[in-house]
Amino acid sequence: MRNSDFVAAHTDARAGRRIGIAIYFSQEWDAEDGGEIVFRGHHGEQVVLTPQFNSLLVFDVNAHRDHEVSVVRGQRSRLSINGWCMTATDDIDQRPFQEHRDDLDQRLSPIRTTISI
């Protein structure tokens, strides 16, 4: 993303998408550079995350539906790779959400201990 680029508020929740990911590559990026991801809650609350070099953002697309990327300011480019972890079928949707979260936490537990962010 370059100067004045942004991503309007949207949701990544689509059939098969479970986990959203973003890997950030811009060194020495700070809030003044913009390009922050902003998650919005159901009651107007928001969480603003500034991209950090060599970091991985992982989020549940169903739990964190509404989000956007703020306007990039200045002459530097915001470099990232974005994507989703998918399921082959939607049969997982038949289980209660908490069961999804518990299952995901259990599966990611060994990975979280090996990734340094």
Image (cartoon, rainbow, N blue to C red):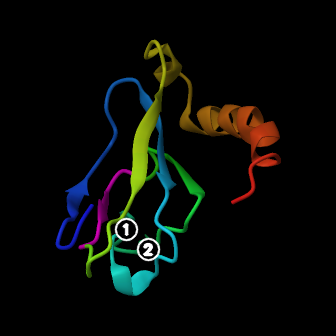
- Is 66 covered by the magenta stretch? yes
Q: Is residue 8 above or below residue 62?
A: below
- Between 105 and 35, the one nearer to me in the picture: 35
> Residue at point 46% right, 76% down?
29
- Is 95 covered by the magenta stretch? no
Q: Position of residue 99 (x, y in %)?
A: 64, 32
- Between 79 and 36, the one nearer to me in the picture: 79
Mark with earlier residue (1, 2): 1
Q: Is residue 107 above or below residue 28?
A: above
Mark number displayed over residue 48:
2
> Residue at point 81% right, 46% down?
114
- Reading the image, the residue beneath label 1 is 38
For badge 1, the amino acid type reads Val
Q: Position of residue 32 (x, y in %)?
A: 37, 87
Is 70 on the left or on the right of 112, as rendered? left
Q: Residues within 10 Å of mark 2 (few under 14, many from 20)?
A: some
> Residue at point 27% right, 61% down?
1
Q: What is the quadrant of residue 45 in the picture?
A: bottom left
Q: Position of residue 56 (x, y in %)?
A: 57, 53
Task: Locate the C terminus by quadrant.
Answer: bottom right
Q: Position of residue 88 (x, y in %)?
A: 47, 13
Q: Which residues are magenta?
A: 65-71
Q: What is the quadrant of residue 54 in the picture?
A: bottom right
Q: Residues within 10 Å of mark 1 (few under 14, many from 20)?
A: some
Is 78 on the left or on the right of 29, as rendered? left
